[in-house]
Each structure stands twice: as C-alpha cells, then as structure tokens.
Image (tube, grey):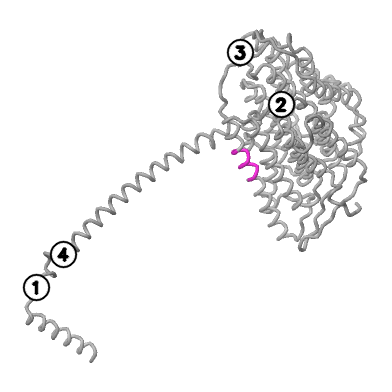
C-alpha cells in the first residue's frame, strides 16, 4: 500500500456530497444533466486511483486515512456510483428538491464509509449516512412516514453510538484506530460488531427496514434499499471476515424473512424482507472468510443492488401509476404496463438465481464456499432459503402484481426515466449472467471459477423447478396464504406496541402511587398542623396568660439547672 496526500476537494465521496448540496442552485431545466454527471464524473475520478491510502490527516495521536482503495472497497464503490446514476435516471420525473438532494448526498456518505481507512472516518460517514437518509423517509410527508422516520433515526444513531463507544475503547486498549480485521474477543470489538449488526439488520434487530423503507416515496425507497445495509455488509467484510458467529447469524437471516414475506400483502414490504434474506447470504460468506467466500459476498452484493433495485423499481412504477402496492388490490397490470412487467420478470429471475442471470453466477460463489468447508447444515439452509427467495421475490412479486387476477385497473406505462433505469438494470442482470468475467475481474481476490458446470446448473434448475411446482400446487389446492390486507406481527411489535403499552401501565401505576403518597402526606401534614394549633394557637395552653410569680419560679428553676450543668 502507498500513502499519498489527497486534497479533500478531490475526495470522490465529496463529489456526491458537495455536488448534491449544490443541487438547489441549479435550474430545474439543467438538473437532470447535472445530477447524472455527478456519479459519472465521480466513478471516472475514483477509477483513476491505484490501490493505496490517500488523504492522511493527523488528529491528536492518531492518523486518519480518509480514503483507502483496494479490491474490496473498489467493487463496493463502483456499484455505489452505478446505483446512484440509475436512481437519478429513475427519478427524472421528480421535482422535489429534498428528494433530489438526498438521493445524491446520502449515497455519497455511504461511499465515504466504504472508502474510510480508519474507524474515526468510518464513524463520521456512518452518522452522516444515518442523518442524510432519514430525509428520504420524511419526503413521504405522511404521518406514518414521520413516525417511521423518527424510529429509523433513533435506531441508526444508536448504531453510531455503539460504534463510537467501541472505537474509543478500542483505541484506548490498542492504541490504534485502523479499520482492519478485528478479533471478536473483547468488549470494545463487541460494540463495533453490534453497531455493524444493527445496520446489517441482524435477526431481532432487523425490522427497522420493514418499518421505514416502505413509508418513503416511490423513488426514495429504492435509494434506501441499496446503501445502508450494503455499507454494513462491507464493514463486516472489512472488520470481521472469518468470524464464525456470522455463519449462523447469516443462516438465520436467510430463513425467517421467507415466512413473513409469503404472508405480506404490501409488495414493497415483501421486498424489504427480501433485503434481510439476501444480506443473510452475504453474512454467511463473510463468516466463512475464505477468499472465495469474500468474493462471493462482494460479488453478490454488487449484483443484488442491481436486481433487487430492479424489483423495487418495477414495484415503484406500479405504485406510481396505480396508487397502490397491495397485492390484494393489484393483478392484470401487465395489460397496461407490459414493459415494466417484463423488466420485473428479469429481476425476479435474477434474484431467484436462474442460469444466465446475475444471481446465478454470484450466489454460486457463496454456495460453493460453504460446500468447500463441508458445512452440510449451512449448505442445506442456504438451498432452502434459495427456494424461498423464488417463492416470495421470484414468483410472488411479478405474479400478484401483474398476473394473478384482473383487478380492473388500467393505467399508463411507467415514465421514460423509470423505463430507462429499469432497462439498464435488466441489461446488466443478463449481461453479468451471460458473461461474468468483467465482474469476476473486479472481485477482491483473483480466482479461477467456472459458474456454468453441469452439476451446478442441474442442481440449481432442480431446486428452482421444485420451488415453482410447490408454488403451483399450493395455489391450486388453496393452501397458499391468500393476499389480504393485514398487519404482520414482527419484532417491531415489542417496541411499537408492547413497550408503549407497558410504559402506559407503569405510568398509570406511578400516577396512582403519586396520588396516594400525596393524599397520605397531606393528611399527615394536616394532623401535624392541628397539633401545633392545639399547642400554640390562640386558645392553646401555651398561649394563656400566666401569673408573674409562676414565671419567676420557672426562671429560677432554669437558672438552677444551668448552674448544675455548668458545675459538672
């Protein structure tokens, strides 16, 4: 690695951050070109840097490394720039300055976290990402969106607090703030691990995704779906590759969202459960930690951003044109939006990992890494989870949105910007699936991997065909969960319903206790005042007139007692 001085004005992330903040000064007629130029120029500028560390700054006894370029940060940075450009094209119809600014600034902060070479720089961009992303939820401008954004901000800032506490203790214990591989064997490292876990949406810490993302705008949800969890995936790969606990954490992540997604009626929320599921595959690979596994995690993250973004785009287009995204209210939309339906199917085939699509060539890296370590149970779980992905994202999304039944809704096709962004994403899904060599060259570690082996193709096709058969049978016999408007009870029930209800009960109990204490204290005070009145009131014994002789006698007695005490 080499160290160079990097002027902050040339820092690739600042091209997006500062450029995004200047958007309000650009006339609306020129904004499309200006906004699209930011990620394009940023990507070209970033690719001009050779591997190394740049922008070293002294802070107290530490040296900050603002930018680190290596195989891992390069592939995540590249896809962040590409995704930003696609999101800008998709939202060409948007005239909301708040969304326009945030959709560029937020990716820039996430990019800054990916490029961070030390924990302090990571923390700064970690919190900037949390703060900037919440505006995309506020842009929904509904009561639900405002409440969800507050909960989202609390969780994201809480993750930053864990990271801050961990890095302070870690720096105190080790004298280092380097953002490199760490051993999960001390309390400071555990805090950092939990901070990454919150942002990765670990099991029981996951439901902020379902709570907040669907409340954003049509285009805002797509932006949110990409950067936060992928920044966390990168951070885990950088700091905790080979941590065995991640293997089972990731395996659980791939399983539980399937059951929630199958019964969910809101199709954008179905896709948020898919985020949990897909990140789980990456977490498993990071836990294995071999070069093949890390390549699998990075490559799958790259492709997932494209094909899951494509699915979010297609559902956003449906919502934009029909005004609803409930599966129970949709169906037959392919008649009005055939191009969108076609792109959605390509995204579905990609996320289901059909051969010749992007998901196949990258998920295979993870499956092979698991089988190479002879982890039979993890391998079986990932195969089951792959079938589950086909059920809820590969079949349910396009089937219930476009084909299940004719809802009678008729609308226009998606706007041109949406179609262009979806078209580019679809081309990338097929292009990577057919010819993955350029992507493989971008992976962190060199490898010689052939995704299209006979065994791999046949195994995957058997799995997918069985899952399709199971779906058809369940639909035919009426066992598949019907699409009805409902509310899923997930882990957020504990902090959204149970905790407020519990606090309300405790509050009522404390209020009763306060009233009892107040009444009891008032009663005792009244009794005390009554006694004082009886002793010192106008009619009390002490208030009566006494003869002078009695007073002289009492004075004499008191003087005598005083003399005796003074003598002894």
* Marks 1 & 4, CB-CB < 8 Å contact: no
Residue under label 2, please give it.
385
Is residue 53 in the magenta section?
A: no
Dot 2 or dot 1, earlier in sequence: 2
The residues bearing labels 2 and 1 have C-alpha atoms spaced at a distance of: 98 Å
Whole-percent x and y of residue 109?
76, 42
Whole-percent x and y of residue 162?
65, 49
Front residue (pair 32, 473) = 32
Residue under label 1, please give it.
545
Residue under label 4, please give it.
537
Whole-percent x and y of residue 68?
85, 48
* Marks 2 & 3, CB-CB < 8 Å contact: no
The residues bearing labels 1 and 4 have C-alpha atoms spaced at a distance of: 13 Å
Location of the C terminus by quadrant is bottom left
Dot 3 or dot 1, earlier in sequence: 3
Q: How many marks?
A: 4
Front residue (pair 131, 428) = 131
Front residue (pair 24, 250) = 24
């Amino acid at each position: 690695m080499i160290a160079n001085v990097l002027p902050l004005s040339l820092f690739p992330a600042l091209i997006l951050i500062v450029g995004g903040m200047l958007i309000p000064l650009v006339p609306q007629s020129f904004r499309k070109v200006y906004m699209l130029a930011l990620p394009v120029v940023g990507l070209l500028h970033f690719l001009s840097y050779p591997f190394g560390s740049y922008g070293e700054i002294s802070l107290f006894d530490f040296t900050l490394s603002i930018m680190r370029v290596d195989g891992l940060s390069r592939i995540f940075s590249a896809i962040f720039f590409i995704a930003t450009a696609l999101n800008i094209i998709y939202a060409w119809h948007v005239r909301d300055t708040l969304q326009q600014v945030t959709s560029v600034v937020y990716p820039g902060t996430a990019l800054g976290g990916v490029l961070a070479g030390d924990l302090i720089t990571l923390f700064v961009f970690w919190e900037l990402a949390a703060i900037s992303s919440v505006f995309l939820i506020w842009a929904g401008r509904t009561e639900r969106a405002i409440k969800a954004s507050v909960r989202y901000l609390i969780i994201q800032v809480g993750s930053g607090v864990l990271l801050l506490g961990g890095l302070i203790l870690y720096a105190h214990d080790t004298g280092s703030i380097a953002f490199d591989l760490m051993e999960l064997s001390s309390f400071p490292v555990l805090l950092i691990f939990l901070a990454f876990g919150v942002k990765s949406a670990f099991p029981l810490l996951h439901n902020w995704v379902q709570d907040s993302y669907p409340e954003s705008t049509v285009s805002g949800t797509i932006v949110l779906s990409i950067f936060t969890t992928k920044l966390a995936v990168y951070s885990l790969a950088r700091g905790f590759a080979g941590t065995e606990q991640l293997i089972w954490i990731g395996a659980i992540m791939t399983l539980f969202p399937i059951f929630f997604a199958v019964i969910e009626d809101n199709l954008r929320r179905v896709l948020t459960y898919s985020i949990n599921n897909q990140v789980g595959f990456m977490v498993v690979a990071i836990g294995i930690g071999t070069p093949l596994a890390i390549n699998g995690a990075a490559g799958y993250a790259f492709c997932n951003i494209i094909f899951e973004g494509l699915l979010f785009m297609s559902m956003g287009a449906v919502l934009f044109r029909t005004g609803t995204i409930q599966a129970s209210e949709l169906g037959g939309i392919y008649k009005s939006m055939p191009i969108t339906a076609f792109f959605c199917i390509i995204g579905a085939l990609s996320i289901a990992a059909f051969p010749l699509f992007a998901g196949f060539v990258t998920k295979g890296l993870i499956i092979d890494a698991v089988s190479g370590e002879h982890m039979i149970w993890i391998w079986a779980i990932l195969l089951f989870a792959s079938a589950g992905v086909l059920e809820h994202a590969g079949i349910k999304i396009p089937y219930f949105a476009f084909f299940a039944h004719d809802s009678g809704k008729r609308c226009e096709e998606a706007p041109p910007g949406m179609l262009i962004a979806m078209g580019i994403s679809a081309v990338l899904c097929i292009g990577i699936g057919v010819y993955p060599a350029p992507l493989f060259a971008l992976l962190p570690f060199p490898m010689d991997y052939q995704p299209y082996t006979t065994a791999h193709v046949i195994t995957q096709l058997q799995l997918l065909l069985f899952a399709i058969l199971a779906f058809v049978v369940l639909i035919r016999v009426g066992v598949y969960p019907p699409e009805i408007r409902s509310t899923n009870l997930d882990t957020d029930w504990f902090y959204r319903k149970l905790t407020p209800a519990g606090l309300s009960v405790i509050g009522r109990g404390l209020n009763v206790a306060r009233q009892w204490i107040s009444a009891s204290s008032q009663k005792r005070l009244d009794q005390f005042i009554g006694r004082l009145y009886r002793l010192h009131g106008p009619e009390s014994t002490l208030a009566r007139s006494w003869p002078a002789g009695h007073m002289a006698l009492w004075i004499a007695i008191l003087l005598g007692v005083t003399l005796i005490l003074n003598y002894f």
